[in-house]
Amino acid sequence: MRRALWLLAVLAMQPAQAATERVGSLGGIAVIDRLDVADLPAGQTQRFWFRAGDSQIGQDWLVPVIVVKGARPGPRLLVTAGIHGDELNGIDVIHQLVRGLAPADLAGTLVAVPGLNTPGLLRSTREFTPDYSHASPNLNREMPGDENGDGVEHYAGRLWHRLLRPNADEAVDLHTQSRGTAYVLYAFASTPRAQRMANLMGPDVIKLDTGEKGALENELVRDGVPAITLELGTPEVFNPEMVRRGLAGLHNLMREKGMIAGAVVEPKGVFTGNRLAVVRAPRGGWARLLVPLGGMARKGEPVATMADAFGRITDTLLAPESGRISASFTDPRRERGSTIVRIIHMSDAPECREGC
Ligand SMILES: [Zn+2]
């Protein structure tokens, strides 16, 4: 009895359980300051505006959130897109995923955020650009942020502590290459479980990678949440083929996790590498690709040429390593030092075992 009373007293001293904090509504959509999917009813799809921060015109930066809570219990899968504001394919992937997903057929919860970087999306910039007077930081290097900080730290901190981390058992963060360049379907993975998740997405290439400080994927992994970054082609577009493949990959991952019914597909022909060789423009000018994106480059053989303003060839660029072309330019106007191709390969150097 005494022990039970002591236990009750200890429990009473615990801080209140995090719960969804509703602060109003906008167009019939609840506006929230915090999300805890545990207190949402099962078997429903719900949409929210999450308040990620306040803008310089005194209005909230709102981030759309969709929660599909299955009729049956199961894991929470977090799928995010648009942390870089010009990388759009993942937004269409999420929209299509949610449109096709019936809560009655789902075990567990899909937490989907189709557009994390509201200021960047408005300006179509990779960076977090709340206004013109500040440097433009990379929101995907700012996690877990600081709710008590200013600017991007505050925005990242609210996202991390109030929306993303508390509602994720596993996570997929959807990206594309940067402006003027393209990726094949490309996954970053840093742990055995992340490699399995990456493989289930059916990418062309998996890059073993120890990660970047402050990246959503890597900070989730450090905090015990298996996560991958998935790169879907080119920025600023909805590319039907990349979106179709991203959607198919997420369905496959959800089948493997037992969230939806169906047989898991074991993808074939996935190229896994641990090191990148980057070929850069030695001078400004016009680039032509000689090996297509996704093709195999051979060490010492030409991958691209550069021409001057009159079309005269100034450089023939050779592959420094044999491997798969995982990224290439799409805009032939190349500044000195900008990316021509990235060649992914498997290095047997000990320091590259988990990616370098
Ligand atoms: Zn990105």
Image: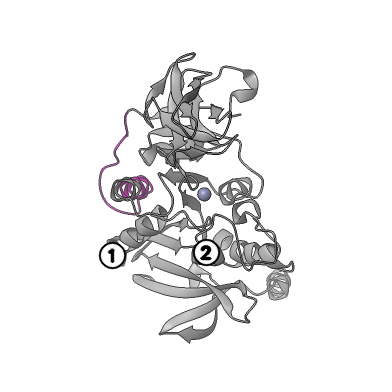
SS at circle 2: helix
Residue that mark 2 sits on: 123
Residue range (magenta): 247-268
Residue that mark 1 sits on: 102
Q: Is residue 105 above or below residue 46?
A: above
Query: Going by the image, does 154 lie left or right of 229?
Result: right
- As measured in the structure, the alpha-carbon distance from the residue carrying label 2 to the one carrying label 1 is 34 Å
Quarter holding residue 266: top left
- Residue 119: % across, % down: 56, 66
Amino acid identity at mark 1 = Ala
Viewer-proximal residue, 23 or 92? Answer: 92
Q: Is residue 228 above or below residue 140?
A: above
Query: Going by the image, does 106 lie left or right of 10?
Result: left
- Residue 225: % across, % down: 55, 49
Amino acid identity at mark 2 = Arg
- Residue 134: % across, % down: 70, 63
Quarter holding residue 21: bottom right
Confirm whether residue 90 shows in the render. yes
The magenta stretch spans residue 47 = no
